[in-house]
Image: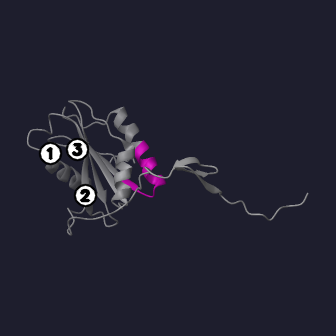
Amino acid sequence: MRKSNRKVKRVAYSKHNEIVVFGLGLIPKQGVPEIKITYRRTRKEFLGKITHSKDVADFIRKTFKAGTLELQESFITLYLNTANEILGYYNHTVGGINATLADRRLILATALASASVGIIVSHNHPSGNIKPSEADIQLTRKLRDGASTLDIKLLDHVIITKSGYYSFADEGML
């Protein structure tokens, strides 16, 4: 058999208001939203540097309004640069008395959009119990693995209460 040296080309042609691209199908000429990625820091200074899990707990406690730490769960993520300086934080969800949801895709999308190289996730336990639930452990593993594929490091998951905190990193769970 003889090998062909011909290169395969993507063929596109116009068909009314659609473009046909072989291998992709029909794509409308108009109405396709353009996705733009921008990064703009509104503050020149950083919000602080993380050197220990206590720094995380102290910072996260400050993000809660008075009287809400023991009322309902919230899931907050810190986004960090290579020097572990806080680029920003995002309160991803506010839940109920004993649970909140965390969407890993939103957490990681925000990390990519902010050009973060590290993230620290945190949530509170209004009950005062700092022990992680099985759901907390599973979420942490999934976040760690997902972040790793994007070359983003999940540095810690800190559960906070009014008087204490639990660090996954300190306990060797990362």
Residue 113, x across and y down, in percent: 35, 57
* Vertical order, 65 against 49 (above or below): above
Residue that badge 3 annotates: 165
Question: Residue 61 versus residue 24: which sits nearer the camera?
Answer: 24
Q: Residue at point 33% right, 54% down?
A: 119
- What type is the residue that disc 1 sits on? Phe
Name the element at disc 1.
loop
- In the image, taking residue 166 as reference, residue 117 lies left or right, namely right
Question: Residue 156 versus residue 97: which sits nearer the camera?
Answer: 97
Name the element at disc 3.
strand
* Vertical order, 85 against 95 (above or below): below
Comes first in the chain, label 3 or label 1: 1
Which marked residue is nearer to the observer: mark 3 or mark 1?
Answer: 1
**Residue 64, numbered label:** 1
Comes first in the chain, label 2 or label 3: 2
Residue that badge 2 annotates: 88
Q: Residue at point 22% right, 31% down?
A: 96
Q: Which residues are magenta?
A: 142-155
Q: Residue at point 27% right, 46% down?
A: 122
| Residue lying furthest right | 1
Q: Measure the alpha-carbon separation of dots 1 and 2.
A: 15 Å
Q: Residues within 10 Å of mark 1 (few under 14, many from 20)?
A: some
* Vertical order, 127 against 51 (above or below): above
Q: Quadrant of residue 67?
A: top left
| Residue lying furthest front | 16
Q: Quadrant of the N terminus?
A: bottom right
